[in-house]
Image (cartoon, rainbow, N blue to C red):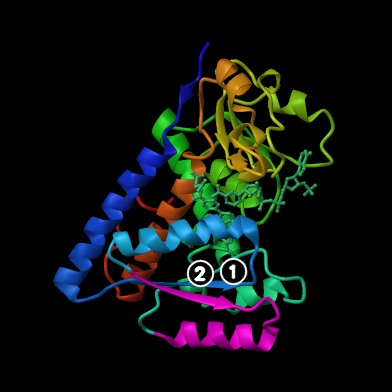
């Protein structure tokens, strides 16, 4: 069986199109333009790709985009003061603090200082708690993007077995919550899981978010399984020339695609969905802030 490629890039373009339509209507009917603030401390290489693509696409959907690039040596007090200013700024509807932060900064404290209503990453403890108890919240962008692709593929996810590889607060845990809410039977595997290949082979749905280049190979999969590859790994690519690099996922695409029913590529899969969902969350936050009806189909 040759797996079907899930085109996250095209799906994300469609989501951004819907966001852009809503933004245009907000402007025309209410004179409101949603604003997103991105805070980047230091120069984490993995974060650069994200920031680059994000700023451009925010403007393309008609939103205001503000970037705060701070030196890696920025003190916690300075960063918290910036967040307080953004919390109080009526032109800002969404605040994203790029992770990971340099080691001297307490990321839990930083994230929990963001106004939960502006927490478009969905990482604030109150949003985490709301999601975990099935209440309305801001839903983390990457897992939300994965969920949209899975719902589009399957229709209903009810009763399907899902394995999430990775248990981070950013991807693995919120992915678990969203799949459980859609009535999947969910297993979360991680670096201490015994015989992870066998665990994986049980699943109708595999979401890989481990940050290990091409760890999952075709023989880990049940034939027909649907694979969502979250991994963004920068690896040397001597075949492209000396000193060149490329981005690969957590799944070995060729071997997985032979066994899977469908699979997302890297790049062009989950990454663009993350950005589209960030824009959707910013729009949702803006509508809630202004007491306007939320766009349909753009949140979980
Ligand atoms: N496409 C996108 O939009 C995004 C992509 N990413 C990418 O997704 C990947 C994961 O990100 P993130 O969740 O933040 O990563 P973290 O490093 O925070 O978490 C990785 C998780 O994978 C587990 N893990 C690591 N090695 C293994 C292994 N050999 N076998 C099984 N489990 C393992 C870890 O287990 P343990 O807890 O036991 O240590 C941990 O739970 C990265 O490649 C990242 O760049 C992240 C965010 C968005
Ligand atoms: N607070 C916070 N929230 C995040 O959501 C967050 C973060 N910090 N830190 C870093 C990770 C990583 N991440 C990516 C998002 C999109 C692409 C992306 O656009 N990828 C494209 C382009 C890749 C390319 O340019 O080659 C693709 O996969 O097709 C990549 C990586 C979000 N993260």
Q: Is residue 164 above or below residue 88?
A: above
Residue at horizontal 61 percent and vertical 45 percent from the top:
232
Image: magenta residue range: 64-89
For the residues labelled 2 and 1, the Cα–Cα distance comes to 7 Å
Farthest-out residue, front: 242
Residue carrying label 1: 124
**Rendering coords of residue 101 (x, y %):** 68, 69
Residue carrying label 2: 119
SS state under label 1? loop
**Rendering coords of residue 269 (x, y %):** 48, 39
Q: Is 273 covered by the magenta stretch?
A: no
- For the question of whether residue 133 can be seen, the reply is no
SS state under label 2? loop
Circle 2 Cα neighbour tier, 10 Å, few/some/many (<14 / 14–19 / ≥20)? many
Q: Nearer the viewer, residue 271 or 48?
A: 48
Q: Is residue 246 left or right of residue 26?
A: right
Circle 1 Cα neighbour tier, 10 Å, few/some/many (<14 / 14–19 / ≥20)? many
Is disc 2 in contact with disc 1, using a CB cutoff of under 8 Å?
yes
Residue at horizontal 67 percent and vertical 64 percent from the top:
100
Q: Is 66 covered by the magenta stretch?
A: yes
């Amino acid at each position: 069986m040759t797996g079907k490629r899930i085109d996250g890039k095209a799906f994300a373009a469609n989501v951004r199109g819907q966001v852009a339509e809503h933004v245009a209507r907000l402007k025309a009917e209410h004179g409101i333009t949603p604003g997103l603030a991105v805070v980047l401390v230091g120069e984490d290489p993995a974060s650069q790709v994200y920031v680059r693509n994000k700023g451009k696409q925010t403007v393309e959907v008609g939103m205001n985009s503000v970037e705060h690039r701070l030196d890696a040596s920025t003190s916690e007090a300075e960063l918290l003061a910036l967040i307080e200013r953004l919390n109080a700024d009526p032109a800002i509807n969404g605040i994203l603090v790029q992770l990971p932060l340099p080691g001297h900064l307490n990321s839990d404290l930083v994230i929990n200082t963001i106004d939960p209503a502006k927490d478009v990453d969905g990482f604030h403890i109150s949003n985490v708690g709301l999601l975990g108890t099935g209440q309305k919240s801001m839903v983390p962008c990457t897992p939300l993007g994965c969920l949209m692709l899975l719902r589009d593929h399957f229709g209903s996810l009810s009763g399907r077995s899902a394995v999430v590889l990775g248990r981070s607060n950013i991807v693995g845990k919120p992915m678990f919550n969203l799949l459980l809410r859609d009535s999947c039977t969910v297993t979360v595997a991680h670096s201490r899981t015994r015989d992870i290949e066998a665990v994986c082979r049980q699943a109708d749905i595999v979401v890989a978010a481990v940050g290990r280049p091409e760890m999952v190979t075709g023989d880990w999969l049940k034939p027909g399984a649907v694979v969502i590859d979250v991994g963004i790994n920068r690896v040397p690519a001597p075949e492209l020339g000396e000193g060149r690099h490329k981005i690969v996922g957590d799944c070995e695409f060729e071997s997985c695609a032979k066994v899977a029913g469908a699979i997302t590529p890297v790049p062009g899969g989950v990454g663009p969905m993350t950005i589209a969902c960030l824009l959707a969350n910013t729009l949702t936050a803006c509508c809630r802030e202004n007491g306007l009806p939320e766009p349909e189909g753009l949140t979980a």
